[in-house]
Amino acid sequence: MSVQERKERERASRERLIVATARELAEQQGWDAVTTRRLAERIEYSQPVLYSHFRGKREIIGAVALEGAAEMAAVLRAAASAADGSRARVTALTRAYLDFAERNPAVYDAMFQLDGGLAFAKEDTPEPLKDAFAALLESLGEVAGDSVHPALFTEVFWAALHGLATLTRAGRLPPGDTERRVELLVERLARV
């Protein structure tokens, strides 16, 4: 292995460490606790080393969001592929999405609530974000109906999922009705 290859491998490893540490700190204490000073202390590198990878917290949030989007896409596809039939797929997809949001609140915030400097619904949208949407579209497109564009239907369904995830987490919806909400969303919106 050349010196250059070793340096590139070390750089990639440091970058993964920064993102993993930011994510862990955010999940434990919230995004306000994630500062470049605190990250530098936790990873045992200087702040200039951290800044050589990311220009600041915004880019770190963006990196966490991209990692989260890739994970969400995998979770959604696994849930949908394990189900048999349209209704079961949409129900499994819905539960998987809401479970992901509940289990990973800081990652979910990085993906959808915080400014990570990422473009959504544009030509320059990063691939992991496009893939997370595609993971929804793959199952929801089949239940959109003949008169509705599958991507438009997926956007509306996703908005409903996001609303449920956000309102549930904020304590704005009564606990205990989650399963009924999932059933209602699948039955009325997906009509399967």
Image (cartoon, rainbow, N blue to C red):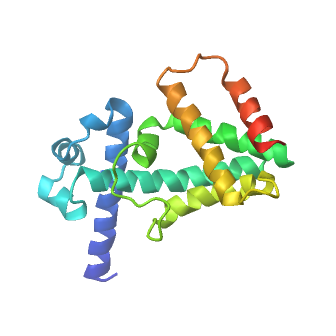
Outermost residue toward the front in this view: 147
Q: In which quadrant is the C terminus drawn?
A: top right
Q: Image check: 142 left or right of 34?
A: right
Q: Is residue 46 visible?
A: no
Tell which of 19 and 72 is nearer to you. 72
Is residue 147 at least partly visible in the picture? yes
Front-most of 129 and 50?
129
Would you place residue 183 above or below residue 43 in this image?
A: above
In the rendered image, the residue lying farthest to the right is: 85
Kindly identify the residue that appears in the image at 32 percent across and 45 percent down. 21
Q: How many marks?
A: 0
- Relative to residue 192, is residue 10 drawn left or right? left
- Residue 38, x across and y down, in percent: 19, 41
Choose top left, top right, bottom left or bottom right for residue 97: top right
| 54 on left or right of 191 | left
Quadrant of image for the N terminus: bottom left
Tell me what residue is drawn at x 74 percent, y 49 percent: 80
User: In the picture shown, does residue 147 fall above or below 100?
Assistant: below
The residue closer to the viewer here, 42 or 122, is 122
Is residue 98 shown left or right of residue 91? left
Q: Where is residue 49 drawn, in percent x and y? A: 17, 60
Q: In the image, residue 12 lies at what x, y percent? A: 33, 65
| Residue under the point 45% across and 65% down | 126
Closer to the camera, 142 or 131? 142
Q: Is residue 174 above or below residue 103?
A: above
For image coordinates 58% across by 32% down, the residue present is 164
